[in-house]
């Protein structure tokens, strides 16, 4: 009999009713075989069928919103207004990809027509567009039970382009995952799609995740979580007889640089926004600002005083689950045992029995970072941050040049600061996926221009985003047709352009027919 596990109330630790069986190798094999069988039918399904499928997922989620929010709140402790807002974001994401399908230009159609009489050799007719890769395995994230989970961006972007999906439910919120999976299954049935288009399996053990990635029918993997977990899956995929990509979004320090004039004119204002960003959602965001750099002096003291006052006033709150809380406590302890590091402020009153995290702000000299880099470079997932006092401006550049890849970097500066610190800003563009000026890294604007990724270890592949419209690019590959008769071409590449999409025809972007 397969082992089972249970879910727990994030705030009280109380065991919730119900048991969830660890997926067996036979169940994993069956899910991926069904996905592979469904792939040919699904990838050739009419665009409108796939678009309606996504819209039905959104509508079904909205219809069950109150039940879903209650379930997710019990299992994650994220509460209101976070969970209702996140549910809206997930539904909007599904509809965004439905609109992308109908517009059609996502296929990146390119046509170079033949020149039979070209000398010294004839030019063939060559046409190219994106094709779906096949079955995709999605790992749900603990900190976004709607937007990066069963109906999150990974799932809906893969489904949009014609890839069947097998989701590994996150073991910290399995009830929520089950309810969402039922909605997706119902939407697939209502859309007349084969059963294998979507499946979900449970598993708390590493063996379940390993089996999903190692399965020979898996064509791509999407993961959001820890560096250790993402790298382990990446290594499994790389060792397969036929390696496949693992698009993992992992650890990130998201450093914040406070430039002199900005600090001199609005230190308290910056501190207010910084602490709000640091403690948002109990610090459980991959874009959490875990390190701050500034030149030492009275202005930095003012920032630290105000930020420390605000950190100390933050009410401790339960983290997503006991495992994350334990890791947070261990991470904070790793930093505070360093003799050169001072605790500037720490919130009081955390109830460890309820998995509550106390926000904490550390302070040290920038040289300490280089001395204890192996400790301080490691992300502590939660509401903690380290302020590094830099003796001179070049120290910020030194840090930027040495830092690991990061999802984001933030710079607060006046126009004069930004001009003076161009070298710093230039270096940061080689180390991050997103540069924020006079703002804060948390709170992603989901839109076509967003890039949520970065150089390793922020992600396993910095070319791709896990959030936003371009996230579908992880699940397609270019396919080229040479001298293929019109009757065999997909609609997007036919001469008369029946879908009216934008295409690149003989180096000109146009919606016109080829003639």
Image (cartoon, rainbow, N blue to C red):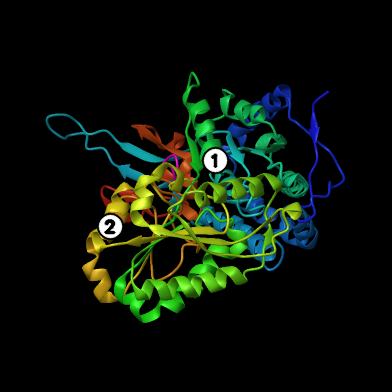
Q: Could you tell me residue 107's position as x and y percent? A: 44, 46
Residue 397 within the magenta-colored segment of the rendering: no
Q: Which mark is residue 10?
A: none
- Is residue 515 visible in the rendered image? The answer is no
Magenta span dominant secondary structure: loop
Q: Could you tell me residue 131's position as x and y percent? A: 47, 38
Judged from this view, the residue extending furthest toward the right is: 17
Q: Nearer the viewer, residue 50 or 265?
A: 265
Which residue is painted at 66% across and 67% down in the image? 315
Q: Residues within 10 Å of mark 2 (few under 14, many from 20)?
A: some
- Tell which circle, 2 or 1, labels the residue nearer the N-terminal end: 1
124 with respect to 36 (left or right)? left
Which residue is painted at 61% across and 49% down in the image? 329
Quadrant location of the N terminus in the rendered image: top right
- Please tell me whether mark 2 sits on a helix, a strand or a loop: helix
Q: Mark 2 = which residue? A: 395
Judged from this view, the residue extending furthest toward the bottom is: 265
- Please tell me whether mark 1 sits on a helix, a strand or a loop: strand
The range drawn in magenta is 457-461
10 with respect to 124 (left or right)? right
Which residue is painted at 45% across and 44% down in the image? 375
30 over 202 or under it: above or below: above
Query: Which dot, 2 or 1, sits closer to the camera?
Result: 2
Q: Could you tell me residue 24's position as x and y percent? A: 73, 25
Which residue is painted at 50% across and 44% down in the image? 250
292 with respect to 80 (left or right)? left
429 over 216 or under it: above or below: below
Q: Mark 1 = which residue? A: 222
Q: Is label 2 in contact with label 1 (beta carbons under 8 Å)?
A: no
Residue 458 within the magenta-colored segment of the rendering: yes
């Amino acid at each position: 009999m397969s082992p089972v596990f249970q879910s727990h109330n994030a705030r009280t630790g109380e065991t919730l009713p119900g048991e969830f069986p660890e997926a067996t190798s036979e169940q994993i094999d069956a899910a991926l075989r069904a996905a592979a069988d469904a792939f040919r039918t699904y990838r050739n399904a009419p665009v409108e069928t796939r678009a309606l499928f996504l819209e039905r997922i959104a509508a079904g989620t909205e219809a069950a919103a109150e039940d879903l929010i209650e379930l997710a709140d019990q299992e994650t402790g994220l509460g209101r207004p976070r969970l209702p807002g996140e549910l809206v974001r997930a539904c909007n994401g599904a509809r965004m990809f439905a609109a992308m399908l109908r517009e059609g230009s996502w296929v990146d159609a390119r046509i170079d027509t033949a020149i039979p009489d070209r000398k010294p050799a004839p030019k063939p007719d060559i046409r190219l567009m994106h094709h779906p890769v096949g079955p995709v395995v999605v790992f749900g994230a603990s900190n976004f039970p709607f937007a990066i989970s069963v109906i999150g961006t990974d799932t809906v972007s893969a489904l949009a382009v014609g890839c069947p999906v097998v989701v590994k439910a996150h073991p910290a919120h399995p009830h929520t995952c089950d309810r969402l999976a039922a909605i997706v299954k119902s939407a697939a049935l209502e859309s007349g799609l084969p059963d294998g288009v979507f499946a979900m399996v449970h598993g708390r053990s590493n063996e379940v995740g390993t089996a999903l990635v190692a399965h020979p029918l898996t064509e791509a993997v999407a993961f959001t979580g820890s560096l250790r977990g993402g790298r382990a899956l990446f290594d499994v995929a790389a060792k397969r007889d036929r390696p496949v990509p693992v698009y993992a979004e992992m650890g990130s320090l998201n450093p914040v640089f406070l430039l002199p004039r900005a600090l001199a004119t609005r230190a308290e204002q910056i501190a207010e926004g910084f602490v709000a960003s640091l403690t948002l959602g109990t610090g459980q965001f991959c874009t959490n600002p875990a390190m701050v750099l500034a030149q030492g002096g009275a202005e930095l003291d003012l920032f630290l005083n105000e930020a420390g006052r605000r950190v100390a006033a933050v009410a401790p709150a339960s983290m997503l689950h006991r495992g994350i809380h334990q890791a947070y406590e261990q991470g904070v302890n790793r930093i505070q045992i360093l003799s050169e590091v001072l605790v500037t402020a720490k919130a009081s009153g955390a109830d460890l029995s309820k998995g509550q995290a106390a926000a904490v702000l550390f302070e040290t000299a920038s040289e300490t970072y280089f001395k204890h880099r192996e400790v301080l470079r490691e992300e502590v997932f939660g509401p903690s941050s380290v302020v590094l006092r830099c003796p001179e401006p070049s120290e910020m550049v030194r840090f930027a040049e040495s830092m690991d890849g990061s999802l984001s970097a933030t710079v607060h500066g006046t126009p004069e600061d930004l001009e003076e610190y161009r070298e710093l800003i230039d270096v940061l563009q080689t180390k991050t996926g997103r540069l924020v000026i006079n703002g804060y890294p948390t709170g992603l604007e989901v839109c076509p221009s967003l890039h949520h990724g970065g150089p390793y270890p922020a992600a396993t592949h910095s070319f791709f985003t896990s959030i936003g419209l371009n996230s579908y690019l992880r699940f397609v590959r270019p396919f080229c047709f040479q001298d293929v008769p019109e009757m065999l071409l997909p609609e997007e590449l036919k001469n008369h352009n029946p879908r009216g999409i934008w295409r690149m025809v003989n180096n000109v972007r146009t919606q016109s027919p080829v003639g």
